[in-house]
Amino acid sequence: MSKPLQAIRGMNDILPAQSAQWRWVEGHISALMSEYGFGQIRTPVVEVTELFKRSIGDATDIVEKEMYSFADRNGDSITLRPEGTASCLRAVLENALVDNNQLAKLWYIGPMFRYERPQKGRYRQFHQFGAEVFNGNGPDVDAELIALTARLWQRLGVSDAVTLELNSLGSSEARAAYRAALVDYLQKHQSDLDEDSQRRLTSNPLRILDSKDAATQQILENAPKLLDCLDDDSHRAFETLKKRLDLLGIGYRINPKLVRGLDYYNQTVFEWVTDQLGAQGTVCGGGRYDGLAQLLGGKATPAAGFAMGLERLLLLLETLKVVPPDQLSCPLPLYICPLNEQATQVAFKLSEDLRSALPGLHLQINLSGGNVKNQLKKADKSEAQYALLLGEDELARQVVQCKPLRGQGEQQEVIWRDLAGWVSQRLFKVTSNED
């Protein structure tokens, strides 16, 4: 017998036992984005490879090592999207969503793909939620994006486990000046840098600030600071952002080594980090990318956004033992146990009548047969509150036996025509007691 096929390494199934928490998180996200005036956008999973080379940067790890790129049947190079911002902006430019300088506030959620070593919280297919604001200039947009994420942490119950880190990369000119100063300093210590940092010294020196190598970090302690190279406009914008966050009571710490991993960022960059997940400490990251539209062939468009990995966020919830309230199932789910063929036919009719009378009712019918004992075991395993028994005697008298499976209570006999009212009363009682 051949071995069953398995999922590709780093690409995981989300099973029913897990998907309830996913839906809970996604429900909070969807509601929050509507409250802040964002519209959802859904972009293709596959894009032309050039989109990501232009936007992310040839010298980044994503483009150099991690993208799933291949030739299609026409010989064109296409790529499974490794992140959401470039696809979102491509759609905005292609569909003229920012013509006449109109403000566009968009959010997305969906799978992304990067070929890297799978580990807990980091997978080859992963899911991101992100938000982007186009034609929104200045620090007020940055402040609202950060406030939105802070509110999400509050609603999910993880506010005490995450910390906001801020930095400013300044204008492209200021960033170029800092790049030159950093390279000049690091070249004096080149032989002591780790291998990756030596390679990045000529291709992407700002990424050296992100190095995890202890010796490299020791060298960086005396390196020039990016904030010291800011132009006046960037400095004022950064100070205004901090004032807005102070006003909102959102705490933060300045991290002068925070540069983000993608080439398109400028001015404000931020990350929400946690010490609860070991090496996977970044829960959410974002910032401004005012020059990206021009790189993709559009006109200059102020832009800012953020993204977060849902697997890592759910791992944080699991680590903190944040269990969502049971809002995803009816407070009185039912399990119908028909004990013969005719009872199964009646069970179908009763179940559809109940669903019509009580929208949102969670109800199952046992369709695999079995005796009373066997069916009650299945009902109990389904975590139903009541088992509704239908046998020959019940069919003859047009009643059901309603047997409680959770808590106290006696089995009750209910006439078919009264069943919806009986269930409704039990639902109301459960709700009232919880209130």
Image (spheres, grey):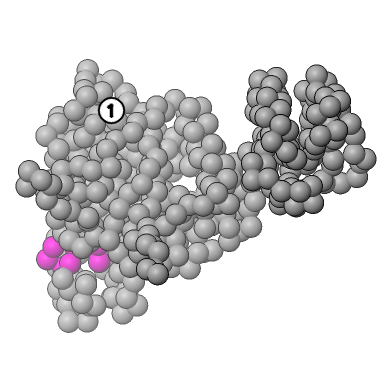
Splitting the image into 4 quarters, where does residue 212 fall? bottom left
Q: Nearer the viewer, residue 192 or 126?
A: 126
Neighbourhood count class around disc 1 (C-alpha, 10 Å): few under 14, some 14–19, many 20 upward: many
The structure residue drawn at horizontal position 41% and vertical position 43%, both measured from the top left corner, is 129
Position of residue 428 in the picture relative to residue 188 (left or right): right
Position of residue 20 in the picture relative to residue 409 (left or right): left
**Does dot 1 land on a helix, a strand or a loop?**
loop
The structure residue drawn at horizontal position 30% and vertical position 64%, both measured from the top left corner, is 116
Q: Position of residue 123 (x, y in %)?
A: 38, 60
Q: Label 1: which residue? A: 135
The magenta span reads 200-208
Q: Is residue 207 above or below residue 75?
A: below
Q: Position of residue 99 (x, y in %)?
A: 21, 20
Q: Nearer the viewer, residue 53 or 363?
A: 363
Q: Is residue 348 above or below residue 380?
A: above
Q: Position of residue 20 (x, y in %)?
A: 57, 45
Give the residue type that dot 1 points to. Answer: Asn
The structure residue drawn at horizontal position 73% and vertical position 33%, both measured from the top left corner, is 343
